[in-house]
């Protein structure tokens, strides 16, 4: 068993560390840098059809839903198509509006999640064009869809999803570039710039993994906390949601993920000296850096403990937070991939220090094949 885990104590830890390789596999053979285009070998949509889409609906559950929220930012910004992200478990039960001009995307690691599959089939029945983004070849969603794209993360054994999430983000980024090129909203040069940035992601993930000793210190200090709050704005909001979900799933500590601007509309009441708040604050105008610094100040003013995830050269946030975790600077759309890694490590180490069964957390199954 230790051999299967490659010397790691848990599959989850191994899978966190596999991410540079997994993301390289997601990208392999798909980036046509000189043409400023993306190649998916399964792609079967003509430019006219792509131009005729009026809306994208993303269906997913759990972690895959979080990648959908990040994907909305990518597709809207590069392909200028409106995107709605739906909880697949709710979709069928509320008379959804689905039209032939809609592209419906199911995102699922397993490709077998009953709620997502059910919603996806319903969208297809209502006439939408369907695209499945899955990690498992030959899974039900890949068979049900008009088009599928594999994330190529390799098998994910830990119940808490890690490399499946970051490879979904990268796949969605590639898809956004592809749609942008086909719809004419992205020039060759702009696409080349996005693809060049994508080529740097595996190395960035290698670099960010070096924050593990610092994350372990934070985990030791807060392993007995009752609650955690995670804050992020813009494309960092789904990262906050994912950080909170990861911690809940394996450490059994209550955690909430919030968009930074929402803090004053409720959760601020929870903040006291016992409340650790993880603030995602990479320095980028699209993630409203000054506003997130404001969140840090508000938390500190109420005695809360701030753990800030910041760019490696950021001195301002450094002086304000109780703990900082430094990550390599990335563009607004790629920062979610990079910033997720320390949150996965935080959840892992807190759970491990609490002696929990990290790979098989209580009450959870890897794939939820019943509604
Ligand atoms: C992730 O850590 C969870 N175990 C869970 O939320 C999962 O993402 C969800 O059940 C969806 O699974 P899928 O991606 O296989 O559809």
Image (cartoon, helix red, strand yellow):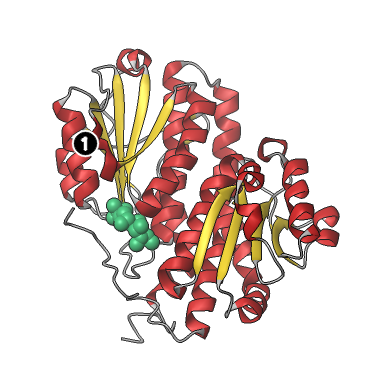
**Does residue 272 appear in this view?**
yes
Q: In this view, does 155 lie to the left or right of 175?
A: left
Q: Position of residue 159 (x, y in %)?
A: 33, 68
Write down the quadrant of residue 343 in the picture. Answer: bottom right
Identify the residue shown where x is 77% and y is 49%.
293
Ligand 1 location (quadrant): bottom left
Identify the residue shown where x is 32% and y is 76%.
360
Viewer-closest of 134 and 22: 134
**Does residue 325 appear in this view?**
no
Q: In this view, does 237 lie to the left or right of 210?
A: left
Viewer-closest of 314 and 249: 249
Q: Where is residue 265 in the image (x, y as percent from the top left)?
A: 62, 44
Q: For ligand 1, tell me if the residue under mark 1 lies within 8 Å.
A: no
Identify the residue shown where x is 61% and y is 33%.
193
Viewer-closest of 40 and 164: 164
Q: Against 47, is 174 above or below? A: below
Q: Where is residue 337 in the image (x, y as percent from the top left)?
A: 54, 51
Which secondary structure, mark 1? helix
Q: Against 87, is 255 above or below? A: below
Q: Against 199, is 16 above or below? A: below
Residue identified by numbered label 1: 92
Q: In this view, does 350 lie to the left or right of 104?
A: right
Total labels drawn? 1
């Amino acid at each position: 068993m230790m051999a299967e885990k490659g010397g790691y104590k848990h599959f989850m830890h191994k899978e966190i560390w596999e991410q540079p390789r997994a993301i390289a596999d997601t990208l392999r053979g798909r980036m046509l840098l000189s043409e400023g285009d993306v190649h998916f070998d399964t792609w079967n949509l003509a430019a006219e059809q792509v131009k005729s889409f009026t809306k994208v609906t993303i269906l997913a559950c759990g972690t895959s839903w979080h990648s959908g929220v990040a994907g909305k930012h990518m597709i809207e910004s590069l392909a200028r198509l409106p995107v709605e992200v739906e909880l697949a478990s709710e979709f069928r039960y509320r008379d959804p509006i689905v039209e032939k001009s809609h592209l419906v995307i199911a995102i699922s690691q397993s490709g077998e999640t009953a709620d997502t599959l059910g919603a996806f089939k319903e969208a297809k029945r209502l006439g939408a064009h369907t695209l499945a983004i899955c990690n498992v070849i030959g899974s039900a969603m890949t068979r049900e869809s008009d088009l599928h794209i594999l994330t190529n993360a390799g098998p994910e054994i830990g119940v808490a999803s890690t490399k499946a999430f970051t490879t979904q983000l990268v796949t969605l980024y590639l898809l956004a570039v592809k749609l942008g090129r086909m719809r004419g909203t992205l020039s060759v040069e702009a696409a080349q710039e996005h693809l060049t940035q994508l080529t740097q992601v595996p190395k960035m993930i290698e670099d960010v993994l070096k924050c593990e000793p610092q994350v372990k210190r934070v985990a030791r200090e807060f392993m007995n906390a009752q609650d955690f709050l995670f804050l992020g704005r813009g494309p960092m909001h789904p990262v906050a949601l994912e950080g909170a979900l990861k911690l809940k799933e394996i450490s059994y500590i209550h955690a909430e993920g919030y968009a930074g601007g929402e803090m004053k509309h409720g959760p601020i009441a929870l903040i006291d000296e016992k409340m650790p708040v993880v603030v995602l604050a990479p320095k980028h105008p699209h993630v409203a850096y000054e506003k997130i610094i404001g969140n840090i100040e508000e938390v500190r003013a109420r005695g809360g403990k701030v753990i800030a995830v910041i760019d490696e050269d950021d001195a301002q946030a450094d002086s304000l937070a109780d703990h900082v975790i430094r990550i390599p600077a990335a563009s607004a759309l790629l920062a979610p991939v990079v910033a997720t890694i320390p949150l996965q490590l935080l959840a892992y180490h807190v759970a491990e220090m609490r002696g929990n069964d990290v790979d098989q957390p209580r009450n959870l199954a890897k794939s939820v094949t019943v509604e």
